[in-house]
Each structure stands twice: as C-alpha cells, then as structure tokens.
Amino acid sequence: MTGLKTRPDFDAVVIGAGFSGLGMLHRLRDVMGLSVRVYETGSGVGGTWYWNRYPGARCDSESYIYCFSFSKELLQDWTWSGKFPEQPEILSYLEHVADRFDLRRNIQFNTRVTSATFREDTNRWQIETDQGARVTAQYLITGIGCISTGNVPRIEGLDSYQGDWYHTGAWPHDPVDFTGKRVAVIGTGSSGVQSIPVIARQAESLTVFQRTPQFTVPARHRAADRQFIEEEVKPNYQEILEKARWSQGGGPHDPVERSALDYPEAERNQIYEDQWALGGYDFIARSFADVMTDRAANDTAADFIRGKIREIVKDPETCRKLLPHDHPFGAKRALLDTNYYATYNRDNVHLVDLRSTPIRRITPTGIQTSERDFDLDIIVFATGFDAMTGTFFKIDIRGRNGLALRDKWAEGPKTYLGLQAAGFPNMFMITGPGSPSVLSNMPVSIEQHIDFIADFITWMRERDIETAEADPQAEEAWVVHVNEVADTTLYVLANSWYLGANIPGKPRVFMPYPGGVGPYRQKCNQIARNGYPGFILTRPATSHQPVS
Ligand code: N01
C-alpha cells in the first residue's frame, strides 16, 4: 500500500466546463476548500451552449428558471432579455459566472481528457489528456453533458461532397451565411425545428429531409416580462426555485389535476386552444394531468396538434408528410418552435419524406434520394447525438481490475442513481444515465447532483473514508427501478434517443430516470440521511475493505 499516503495532484478532477463543471468547481473549491482541476475540450466555458451555436438555438426552459441558484446575489443581478434564453445569452451568462467567481484559473481549456484509470494501489484516479498531462486525483467527476457527442450519420459519399456541411452540435464560431445558398437540413428534432425557420429566411432554397414527423408546440417566444421578473420572481426567487426542485420536471408551476378524458371534446379543445395560444411547455403541464401518462388522453392532444398542422400548412401533400403518426405526443422529446409549420408555406422551402424516398448517397454536388438528385451548397446535419453514453465512451475510463466503462455498459448503461457505476470508486457523474437529467430543467438536476456529490464527499472526509462506489446490488436494483418506471410511461412507445434508438447498433435501453426530479431528490436525500446505503465505503490502508 505504498501510495496510500501520497497526496494526489488534485483532490478532484472535473471533466467539462458547462453548467455542471462550473457549479461543481465553485462548490468544491470555494465552499469545501478542495484543490480542483477542470479539463475542458473547448476554448471557453459553456458546454452545450459553447458548441450548439446553430441559428435559432435557444433553451426550452423559461429563462428565469434556467440558472444557478447557489448565489442569491447572482440571482438578483442577472436579468434575462427573453422569455426563453437564447444561446448567445446563455453563453454570456456562463461566462459571467466564470468571471464573477474567478473560475477560469482552475480550468484548462483546449484539453480533452483521453483516459481516466482507477489505480487500485493508491486508490487514486490517474487522468491523461491529449495535451500530454498525466495527473492524479482522489475524485473524478464527470460534467460532460448528456447530449454532447454529435451523430453524423454514415451516409455513403459524404467524403466526396464539395459543398460545406455542419452538425448543429459543433457549429462554427463565425456565423454561417446562408444568403443565396441552396441548403439542406437533415433531421427534425429540437435542433432542426429551431434552425429550419431561421435558415429558411436567409437561404435561396431550403430542403428539409425528414425521417420522422414530430409534434411541436409554439414557444411564443418574446421579450421577458420585466414586471413579472422584478415584482414576482426576484422577490420570491428562493421559493420559486424550491418549488422547481420538488416538481416533476424542474419547473415551478402547480400541476393540474384534471383528466383530458373527463371533458367533452369541445371543452377539451378549448383548453388546448388556450394553452396553444400561451405557448411553451404549459401546453403539456397545464392542459391535463394525464397527457403524458395515458395513451387515450395523449391521443386527444396529438389529434389537436394534427388539427393545427392541417390549419397552418397550406399544401396538402406537405401537410400530410408533416403529420406525426407513429408515436405518442411527447414520447420523443416534446418540441417548442417558432413558426416551424408555417415555414413550409414559404416558396423556397421543400420537404422530403425520407420514409418514402430515402437518401441513397451524398454526391459531390448534393444529396441523392431514391427519387432524385438535390444540388446543394450547404448541408446541415440536425441529426442529434449519441446521447448519455457516447461522450463517456470517447474517454477510456477504467475502474477496478482494468474494467472499461464501455465494456461494463456494452448492453446499456448501469448506474446507481445515475451518480456512480459499480467498480468505479470515487467517480461521480453529474446527470449520468439513470438520473432525471434530460427529462427535466437541466440546471435544477445539475445542482441537485452537485449538492449530493459535495455533501457525500464532505461526509466521507469527515469520517476518513477514502473511497465510495456503488454496490452492484444497489446498482442492479436501480436499473430495474428505472426500467419499471419507464415501462409505465409513454416514452417507451417511440424510437427516441432516450432509448438509444437513433444510433445504429446501440442497445435499446431507456437511459434517463423518468420518475421526476422531486421524487428522485427525495430518494437521494433519504439515502444521504441514512448514511449512504447502496454505496460501498472504504477507509485508507484497508484497500477494498468495506466500512461496516
Ligand atoms: O436531435 P434529435 P436534436 N437520416 O435526436 C433525424 C436537446 N436539445 O439535436 O426521429 C435522417 O432529437 C431524426 O429522425 P428520427 C433536446 O434534449 C434541446 O434535434 O430518429 N434523419 C430526428 O428527426 C433534444 O431532444 C434544445 O427518425 C436522421 C433528428 O435527426 C436533444 O438535444 C435544442 C438520421 C434528430 O433529432 C437532441 O435534439 C436542441 C438519419 N440517418 C437540442 N439520424 C432546446 O432546449 C437522425 N435523424 C430547445
């Protein structure tokens, strides 16, 4: 046990400088007094909001709840300009946080972590980077995001394409000028639905290649309501955020209790109509309680939206192609849009249904489908991400006995609470697979994980506990629980990235925890109160000897 008394280079290494990494660094360094190094691939802070600079990029959470809550002063000082925060402003916010709390001095930018190995002889993590660094740390904390490894489909001929192409999740820092260009967007998820109307306004022509029509609800984005923010939000910020913490999805609204099935059609549609006019996720949260839980109730919302598409889209053939038909509303992530369906009424916009005319190949001059060739100057891949696990697999993470995380998760991710994986001591994941993360307002989930991890590490240090790792039995039980809850939802009725269905060959496993952020928080708090059952704890020099 020679190495046990050696101090590691850092108490903690954190990977990523987005919301998770910044919040974790602040907590570990400034509240707990630990030494921390953050590694970040990008040249600046921001994570998701550093990379996703595509036209129209904006968050679907309302701006006043899309923020850190750890500083009362920050909450009072920052004022968002729009109802939904736009990418440049979120990035400015995170840059402001980094400056205000002097976080950059502990972040090494332009540095990708290539491997992280748990050394059983020292109980330390050894971390290596593409810049040649090799450092040790007691705790390894991943803040690598859930949706950060882009999926560019392997379409034959892409290498031969002579125009420009971009993935929405790795957008250039200089804006792309679409003026006078013939543009294609492949993909109609959140990124496609946000970017298509904006690109359509600039491009000479826009052809949208759609594989699955999706449901989208108008965001009704507008300037932030200053009076509401100053008079209702800021004086009550703590209460508002506390309510969000105990909610289902991380928002502060009171849930409705009525069932869609208890209302006559006309009355029900008027309720949908009112929420449609208001816009945003309230269409789901404030219409009826069972839209996301009961298929018959969901059908009423789906029918209403299909009716809206018929009202908005003038060309009958385009309208037919846009009607979602193969999954319940919201089973793929519910989308918010600004003028999405109306964009198809523009003369310069065309829709290609890839189910009936699939892409055969990309040619030097454009895209060839089974029906025809499209000449293009720019192709935009809005084709999503290898979500939740893809970014973990880009790092060679090895736990006890040299076990690679990518081998452990070969049949789907296995975690305890989305926080730890058995066999990987002292590695904590912020919003890992098995946590509510992507099914919630992310900052609420991220801060809950930061709190849990920080409190756990504090608790361990007070008791001279050197390592903590998920107990395999607790992990197995959590995986079963996540799947049982998922099976009661409508999410499992769609081929979504939640299930890994968008990546050929990826195991079909429901990855996030759909039980809600409030119930999840309650479970985590109870585990903390009871002395962290489900985690194996060891003291120094006892190697893998559990603490009884
Ligand atoms: O990706 P997606 P995204 N050929 O996976 C299609 C978050 N986010 O970047 O449905 C042709 O949702 C695919 O078709 P199908 C949010 O959590 C949030 O849009 O698989 N098409 C689909 O239409 C979101 O859910 C915000 O049949 C192909 C599209 O590409 C997540 O990120 C904004 C294809 C991918 O949709 C991902 O969103 C942006 C192929 N080979 C993102 N492969 C906000 O907060 C895939 N597609 C607003």
Image (tube, rainbow, N blue to C red):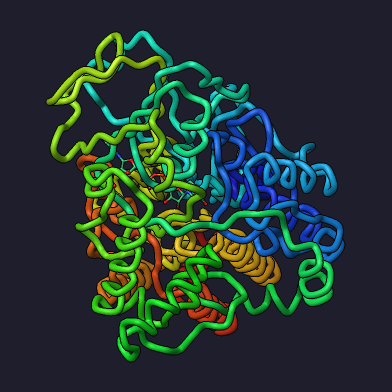
Question: What residue appears at the point 54 percent right and 44 percent down from the top-left corner?
Answer: 125
Q: Residue 362: x, y in percent?
A: 25, 18
Instruction: Tell me if residue 157 comes above or below residue 397 in the rendering.
Output: above
Q: Residue 483: x, y in percent?
A: 28, 70
Instruction: Tell me if residue 433 comes above or below residue 15 in the rendering.
Output: below
Q: Judge from the rendering whether residue 543 lies leftward or rightward of residue 374; answer left or right.
A: right
Quarter of the figure with residue 167: top left
Q: Judge from the rendering whether residue 413 lies leftward or rightward of residue 51; answer left or right.
A: left
Which of 462/99 is in front? 99
Which of 509/116 is in front? 509
Quadrant position of ligand 1: top left
Instruction: Tell me if residue 141 comes above or below residue 208 in the rendering.
Output: below
Q: Is residue 457 visible?
A: no
Question: What residue appears at the point 63 percent right and 42 percent down from the top-left corner?
Answer: 87
Q: Judge from the rendering whether residue 62 lies leftward or rightward of residue 120; answer left or right.
A: right
Q: Residue 380: x, y in percent?
A: 41, 28
The count of marks equals: 0
Which of 403/247 is in front? 247
Quarter of the figure with residue 266: bottom left
Question: What residue appears at the point 64 percent right and 50 percent down from the top-left corner?
Answer: 19
